[in-house]
């Protein structure tokens, strides 16, 4: 499976966030917004940063900042391997392929709540981008 | 900088009179990691005829109850065992104790003793033992298997002891007798409060343990990336037992002398590299962890995890249970 070009990757991530939003319940969204209102995702191998901002009403994409309080950094392939079941995030974390900075470990539960919807949403967004909707038949 | 706290009092067998356990019923509440070895130790010590006493097990968990019955113990529901006890050892998991305590406490007889093997529930005010019972701390600092083995070997093991509430006026004698019969005073036990015990325990688990684990993982992955054989790395790190021998040597000969016993190259390389480690950052993180333990924030998170059905557990189990290269290498070595 070929990896998307960086610009497409950013678009997939943005779409991923929109899809995550549909998978979280209002209660989960509120918990996430309270525990970690912003999570900056960084993919240094493709020079991409994206900030997920959570409020009780919605998740949205925000502008990345230089000194984000909570950062998750990994290679794009690490995310893709996890999303497509080739290697779990847990194994990647043990192998030092995921770096987390600024997370309050006592709020791990809120972060974990995000993991499965995130991987599922990335997979869906990726597959959507690989097969754009066909033109309507006239 | 504050001056170091004074040494706690150290108790040994000479300070205890186990004969005061004569005729008493000791109930082990929870037959798990600690419950099983302590039951064996106490049965050997006080059920053998020299000090006739009875050891029973309280358990509401069927697999644990079955194990205790198979080990030859009389097993009762938790509250029934508490009602029979002169000494009840609370060995349920820390986070479970607050929920179990009201029913157990209601059945304890005035003048009996409730003994905690961890200061957690007491220190954070999560349990309220009835006022007429002695509340004691007997907290072994060793895994269950080692507790039993070291007792059988006659070496004893380290524990913390304390009296949180002395209702009978005999609380200290009782906890010392129990510790002696439980096998620990051959090595020695330090006097601690429940709060000191739990903070020490959680601090070392959460501040030191993760750094050691992270250092081990990083060394393994940096080495394998550079082409070093994974099995060789694991051997160097822990699989050969050299590292555990080093820790044993630290305990025997002293931390600093042990650093000099691996030859000049090892001490020159180790000490010079240690200088470049950012201990300020390490210390800052450790202070933050200690703050969260001391304030009760960690206990609050753990209780929240328990009340919500352990939502983090599947994630943590999956990390540990994944088919990673370290586990694969260990399996391959064992199959060689």
Image (spheres, helix red, strand yellow):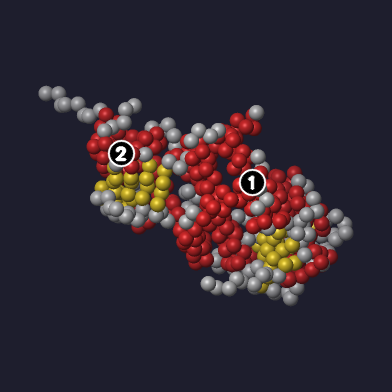
Parent chain of label 2: A
Depth order, front residue of B46/B243: B243
Residue B29 occupies quadrant = bottom right
Residue A9 occupies quadrant = top left
Horizontal side, residue B306 vs residue A7: left or right:
right
Residue A121 occupies quadrant = top left
Please report the residue visible at 59 percent of the width from the left and 62 percent of the height from the top: B200
Residue receiving disc 2: A46
**Which residue sits furthest right?**
B50
Q: Crowdedness of circle 2 by 10 Å Cα count: few (<14), some, many (20+)? A: some
Horizontal side, residue B204 vs residue B289: left or right:
right
Helix, strand or loop at mark 2 = helix
Parent chain of label 1: B
Depth order, front residue of B28/A118: A118
Looking at the rendering, in which quadrant would you find the N terminus of chain A? top left
> Are labels 1 and 2 on one chain?
no
Residue A45 in view here: yes
Q: Crowdedness of circle 1 by 10 Å Cα count: few (<14), some, many (20+)? A: some
Give the image location of residue B139, x and y in percent: 67, 60
Residue receiving disc 1: B243
Helix, strand or loop at mark 1 = helix
Please report the residue visible at 39 percent of the width from the left and 34 percent of the height from the top: A81
Looking at the rendering, in which quadrant would you find the C terminus of chain A? top left
Give the image location of residue B116, x and y in percent: 66, 62
Please report the residue visible at 67 percent of the width from the left and 70 percent of the height from the top: B7
């Amino acid at each position: 499976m070929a990896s998307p070009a960086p610009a497409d990757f950013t678009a997939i991530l943005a779409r991923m966030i929109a899809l995550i939003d549909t998978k979280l319940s209002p209660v989960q969204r509120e918990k996430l917004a309270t525990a970690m209102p912003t999570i900056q995702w960084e993919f240094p191998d493709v020079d991409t940063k994206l900030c997920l901002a959570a409020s009780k009403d919605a998740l949205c994409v925000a502008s990345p900042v230089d000194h984000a309080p909570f950062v998750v950094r990994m290679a794009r392939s690490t995310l893709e391997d996890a999303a497509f079941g080739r290697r779990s995030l847990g194994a990647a974390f043990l192998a030092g392929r995921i770096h987390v900075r600024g997370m309050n470990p006592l709020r791990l539960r809120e972060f974990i709540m995000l993991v499965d919807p995130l991987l599922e949403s990335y997979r869906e967004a990726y597959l959507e981008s690989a097969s754009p909707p066909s033109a309507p038949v006239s | 900088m504050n001056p170091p706290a004074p040494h706690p009092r150290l108790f040994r067998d000479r300070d205890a009179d186990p004969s005061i356990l004569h005729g008493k019923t000791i109930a082990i509440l929870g037959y798990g990691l600690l419950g099983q070895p302590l039951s064996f130790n106490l049965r050997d010590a006080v059920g053998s005829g020299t000090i006739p006493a009875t050891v029973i097990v309280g358990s509401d968990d069927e697999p644990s109850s079955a194990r205790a019955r198979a080990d030859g113990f009389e097993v009762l529901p938790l509250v029934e065992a508490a009602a029979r006890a002169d000494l009840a050892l609370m060995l349920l998991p820390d986070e479970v104790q607050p929920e179990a305590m009201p029913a157990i406490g209601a059945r304890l007889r005035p003048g009996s003793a409730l003994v905690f093997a961890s200061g957690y529930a007491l220190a954070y005010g999560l349990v309220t033992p009835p006022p007429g019972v002695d509340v004691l701390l007997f907290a072994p600092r060793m895994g269950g298997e080692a507790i039993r083995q070291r007792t059988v070997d006659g070496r004893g093991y380290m524990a913390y002891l304390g009296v949180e509430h002395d209702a009978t006026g005999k609380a200290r004698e009782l906890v010392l007798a129990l510790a002696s019969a439980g096998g620990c005073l051959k090595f020695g036990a330090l006097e601690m409060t429940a709060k000191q015990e739990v903070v020490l325990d959680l601090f070392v688990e959460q501040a030191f343990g993760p750094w050691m684990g992270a250092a081990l993982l990083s060394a393994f992955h940096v080495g394998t990336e550079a082409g070093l054989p994974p099995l060789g790395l694991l051997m160097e790190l822990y699989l050969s037992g050299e590292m555990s021998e080093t820790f044993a040597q630290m305990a025997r000969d002293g931390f600093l002398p042990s650093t000099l016993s691996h030859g000049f190259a090892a001490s020159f390389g180790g000490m010079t590299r240690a200088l470049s480690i950012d201990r300020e950052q390490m210390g800052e993180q450790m202070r933050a962890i200690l703050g969260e333990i001391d304030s009760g924030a960690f206990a609050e998170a753990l209780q929240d995890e328990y009340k919500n059905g352990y939502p983090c557990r599947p994630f943590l189990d999956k990390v540990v249970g994944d088919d990673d290269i370290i586990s694969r290498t260990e399996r391959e070595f064992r199959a060689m």
